[in-house]
Amino acid sequence: MEIVKSSSAGTLDSCDIQIRIESNEIGSNEIYLKSVVEKQFGNQIKALINDVLDKHNLKSVTVNAVDRGALDCTIRARVESAVMRAIGRESLEDWSVIHHDK
Amino acid sequence: MLYVPGSNPGMIADSMIYGADSIMFDLEDSISLKEKDTARHLVYEALKYLDFGNVELVCRVNGLDTPYGERDIEAMVAAGIHVIRLPKTETVQDVKAVEILIEQYENKYGLETGSVKMMAAVESALGIMNAHEIAHASNRLVGIAIGAEDYVTNLKTTRSASGIELIYARSQLLNAARSAGIAALDTVFSDVEDTANFENEVRLIKQLGFDGKSVINPRQIPIVHEIFTPTDEEITHAEAVIEAIKEAEEKGLGVISLRGKMIDKPIVDRAIRIIELTKASR
């Protein structure tokens, strides 16, 4: 997957994370994280970000993330949105199915 | 039904703790045009990873006259949403168009046909005039709701404390819902500081016959629950009616009375509803 433009998603509000994505020239992904919970969850947050980048086969991007205590689902959503914007798409073409009890 | 803006991760994460019967994630009017995509992702991931318990999960999607409506429907069907709420429903065709898309995406994602339900929000004079046809438009419809802010604007008036401007619309919507055997849900009350008038409005819509009310702030939930929960007196009477009807059936009696008053079918139906409401509120 190719980055066609720099992008961002998310806010600096409490419980959110702001993600900025741009392509780089070094041939690998870099993640710079600032987080209020960096000592305890820094590696986990970076792993989540990497997971979404891998899913989209992105191999040469720089991510700047500013976390305000976001849950994992919020981190995934914000990275997903930033990636979609960076590759010039509005939405996923295929969503994985979720089953809830009713 | 608690409204939760789909763009706010903090509100989404907290939404299940307030005891709402139903949570409605909004992708429509509370989301700016430039954040439609991020809100869709946020609600989808929240539905995937958070545990909402037994709460009914509803999503208000954007209209199909926008570039976002179909994408919202696809993501929410895949996310296993229980109910898709159509905004600004005015005609049967509005319901049918969304129904076709829901079925298309149920098929795409291997879900049972009919598993995703629908709720139509009526927010204009045309929608109110067509409420009966709208309520009967699809087997997926579990309810219809009135959206008063757009409706009163369309009527060229404003909302008042008495709600006089909504009497016709509420009555029309309610009769449409009842004729179709589906739920009727009342509109939001926007001033969260005005508890007295909120209470008056909830009492009014309960007396009209509505099944519930949309709320925009968790503080409004206990007030709705308190007013809709049957009183001890109502519960005692309902239990006595059910007991009397059981006894009559056992004895083969056709007409029965309770404390000197005849018990007929409408009274039994009301007693059953009281018992059901009591169970639902516990």
Image (cartoon, grey):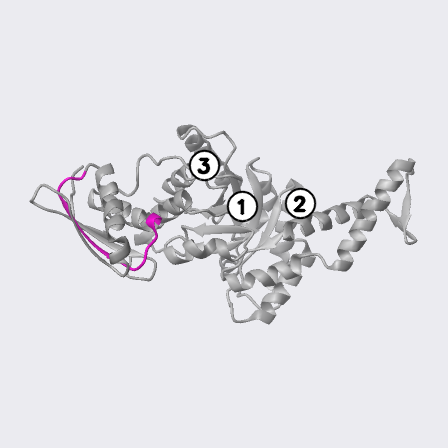
Is B145 magenta? The answer is no
Q: What separation in Å lies between label 3 and label 2 (alpha carbons)?
A: 31 Å
- Chain bearing mark 2: B
Q: Viewed as shown, does residue A65 lie left or right of B29?
A: left
**Residues beneath discs 3 and 2 located on the same chain:** no
Kindly identify which residue carries mark 2: B178
- Mark 3 Cα-neighbour bin, 10 Å: few <14, some 14–19, many ≥20: some
Q: Amino acid at mark 3?
A: His
- Chain bearing mark 1: B
In the picture shown, does residue A54 fall above or below B217?
A: above
Start and end of the magenta stretch? Answer: A58-73
Q: Is residue B88 among the parts visible in the rendering?
A: yes
Q: Viewed as shown, does residue B144 lie left or right of A60?
A: right
In the picture shown, does residue B250 fall above or below B158?
A: above
> Would you identify the image quadrant in which residue A97 lies?
top left
Considering depth in this image, is B198 or B100 the residue closer to the camera? B198
Q: Which mark is residue A99?
A: 3
Q: Amino acid at mark 2?
A: Arg
Which residue is the extreme one toward the front? A40
Frontmost of labels 2 and 1 is 1
**Residues beneath discs 2 and 1 located on the same chain:** yes
- Mark 1 Cα-neighbour bin, 10 Å: few <14, some 14–19, many ≥20: few
Residue sitting at x 62%, y 66%: B199
Q: Viewed as shown, does residue B208 lie left or right of B42?
A: right
Kindly identify which residue carries mark 1: B54
Which image quarter holds the N terminus of chain A? top left
